[in-house]
Image (tube, helix red, strand yellow):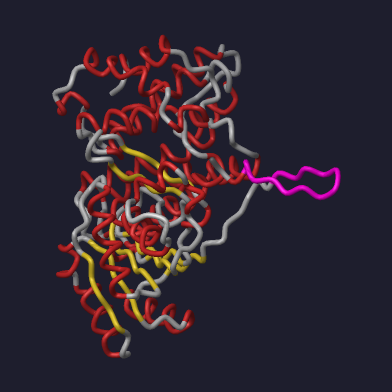
Amino acid sequence: MGSSDRQQSKGAWNIKIRMQQPVKVVVEHDLAKSIMEILKLEDKRRVMIVLDQFLMGVPAVQEMIAEIQKNSIEMTIYGDIVPDPPASVINKGAEAMKNFGADCVIAIDGGSCLDSAKGIDIVASNGDSRDILDYVKDESLIHDFKCLISVPTTAGTGSEMSNALVVTDETTREKNAILSDRILSDYALLIPELTLSLPKRQTIASGLDVFSHAAEGYLSNLSSPMADAISERVMFLCANYLPKAVAEGQSIEYRERMMVAANLAGWILNQSGTIVGHSEAHILGSKYHFVHDEAVAYALPSVLEMSASVLPKKVKEIGKILGAEFTGDETPAEIGAITKQAYLKFRDEQVGLHPFSDYGVSNEELVKNADEVLHERFAGNTSFELTKENVTELLKHFG
């Protein structure tokens, strides 16, 4: 669900709110100084820091911790974060947060950490259940949410801006989403220096995730003219700066551009959502352990091609952003094919995503999941009608 679903009624009027952005976005270069300014501004005295344990060795994080301690702010650290956060990790963190009595959460890392922090905050702040999966089943149980400062260390998920989190049910191995405007970050703090040490493969994958967020939001049936304008700009930033960020990973300028693109794309998630490409990634990723950011990039080519049947102008615009040339006489099918090839050139040649075959999973295996993809939560945002037959076609050409 995106903000385009929110409505306000006044008399006979039924007004759709097309854009809403309550997260305070800060772009700075000094983590410790920025965090202290926010904590003082918000008068927070008991802080829980959620991060991956390896970040404890990063100088900027060490300086932040020292600064918090120097200012006599009580602090606890939860460092048991893992990719694709399972419910047990979130529930354990929530217990720690509740016992400590934190009035603020600082989340520092990639999307899994930021999602975990949201889940921890939900369970610790609401008394209805101590299990995050209960909030998956009934989002109306979310009433309270403590101050959350999200500090991404990748330029990909946009989780610092989104009203969503994804949690893995360890029993079923399914990835489940929670969507609620109550779980938005209070602050998104962008420090491009934190992304300088990202390995090339992660830079590639996270950047392609940004492009997918923008492209899928653009093609969603929840899209709006306002959101579309931002999606177009995000795709432009990715097309122009992701190859440069991959080639020159120590460039603050290119890293900052991609952090801004990721942040804006995360905002778009709240407005337009994602479509069937993300459904494929969620279902297949949980079963075959594909990296999520890579999975959405493997899904997108065929999604672009199929979307051209109902949204040829938009698919053509994506092609133009990627450098494709059109005569103006192309059929929707031809537009889809041209844009697909332009994206593949961008993804594989200019950016350098490794081939899907590296995972060693056949497309014949993937098509067994057509029913689950068809009924996955975000598939309903897709602009073209989904059937088991065309979802099967998408999975045949995944990669």
User: Toward which corner of the image does residue 272 lie, by quadrant?
Assistant: top right
User: Toward which corner of the image does residue 260 lie, by quadrant?
Assistant: bottom left
Q: How many marks?
A: 0
Residue 236 in the figure: left or right of residue 58 = right
Can residue 241 be seen here? The reply is no
Q: Position of residue 24 (x, y in %)?
A: 51, 66
Where's the C terminus, which quadrant? top left
Q: Is residue 253 magenta?
A: no
Give the farthest residue toward the front: 128
Magenta stretch, residue numbers: 4-16
Q: Position of residue 265 (x, y in %)?
A: 47, 47
Q: Position of residue 138 (x, y in %)?
A: 46, 44
User: Does residue 103 sit above or below 263 in this rendering?
Assistant: below
* 193 vs 177, nearest the viewer: 177
Can residue 201 be seen here? The reply is yes
User: Does residue 129 sit above or below 191 in this rendering?
Assistant: above
Rendered residue at 56%/11% (across/down): 331
User: Does residue 69 sit above or below 131 in this rendering?
Assistant: below
Q: Main secondary structure of the magenta part?
A: strand
Residue 384 in the figure: left or right of residue 129 = right
Q: Position of residue 282 (x, y in %)?
A: 33, 33
Rendered residue at 51%/18% (across/down): 335
Give the farthest residue toward the right: 12
